[in-house]
Image: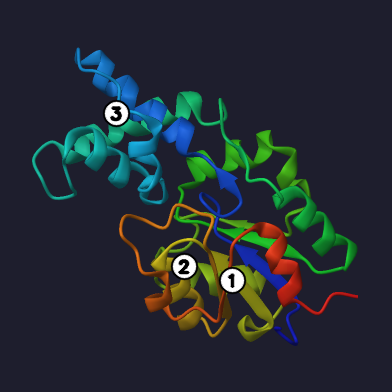
Amino acid sequence: MFRGIRAVLFDLDGTLIDSAPDLGAAANAMLVRRGREAISLDQYRALAGSGARGMLRVAFGIDPGQKDFELLKQEFFSEYQACLTASTQAFDGVSGMLAALGHAGLPWGVVTNKGARFTGPLTCAMGLFATAATVISGDTTPHAKPHPAPLFEAARRLALPPEACLYVGDDLRDIQAGQAAGMKTVAAMYGYLGQGTDVSSWGADASISSPADLLQLLELP
């Protein structure tokens, strides 16, 4: 059990929300436009936490630095922006978990690498985020995770020292950022995780199999 935690910060995709259907749909729209067959959501899901980079790797077998990647990325962004709330929803148990934090008087917030052009409309469209104390996007600070800058900014906005915050995420970058910021970290095992990932190697302070499990790790009144 964690002691002295005064706020909980969360990654977004793969931790609070399941955005894989809309991310995959954006990549599939690009394939269909080129006369190619759409790919199943299962093939996209593991890499959904990597956003455009992951979706383009699955759909086109292309990575950053390769020819045409930047053009495809901008096309993907346009497709995703058009459908970003079509099928995205909170993971089972997230709403109840956030409500329990609020009932206990524990503020919560979001720190994501997703750009503000997506994070803003998405969080405004989903009532889930009405009680968020802060939302930090991937371009809020000069550096994105695994750099600790976004987490430092979240703590600053909450007027709390970083060590009083807990960070929950489903990617190695989340744990690395949390550790670099001096926060306790929790790995969300129900998230996207990546392909063939050994989560035990991340060095998180704890792991959870469902959002509700987080409540068991906190001293709630």
User: Can residue 45 be seen by looking at this rendering?
Assistant: yes
Name the secondary structure under disc 3: helix
Residue name at image x 45 percent, y 55 percent: 113
Alpha carbons under labels 2 and 3: distance apart: 27 Å
Q: Along the polypeptide, which appears first: circle 2 or circle 3?
A: 3
Provide residue 207's location: percent of width, then percent of height: 56, 71
Amino acid type shown at disc 1:
Tyr
Sort mark 3 into few (<14), some (14-19) or many (20+) by Cα contacts within 10 Å.
some
User: Can residue 78 be seen by looking at this rendering?
Assistant: no
Amino acid type shown at disc 3:
Glu
Q: Along the polypeptide, which appears first: circle 1 or circle 2?
A: 1
Disc 1 to disc 2: CB gap under 8 Å: yes
Provide residue 218's location: percent of width, then percent of height: 75, 76
Of all residues, the one furthest to the left in this rendering is 67
- Compared to residue 20, the image places residue 172 above or below, namely below
Alpha carbons under labels 1 and 2: distance apart: 8 Å
Residue bearing mark 2:
174
Residue name at image x 35 percent, y 29 percent: 40
Alpha carbons under labels 3 and 1: distance apart: 32 Å
Residue name at image x 25 percent, y 21 percent: 31
Residue bearing mark 3:
75
Provide residue 135's location: percent of width, then percent of height: 62, 55
Residue bearing mark 1:
167
93, 11: nearer the viewer: 93
- Compared to residue 97, the image places residue 206 above or below, namely below
Disc 3 to disc 1: CB gap under 8 Å: no
205, 151: nearer the viewer: 205
Provide residue 180's location: percent of width, then percent of height: 45, 82
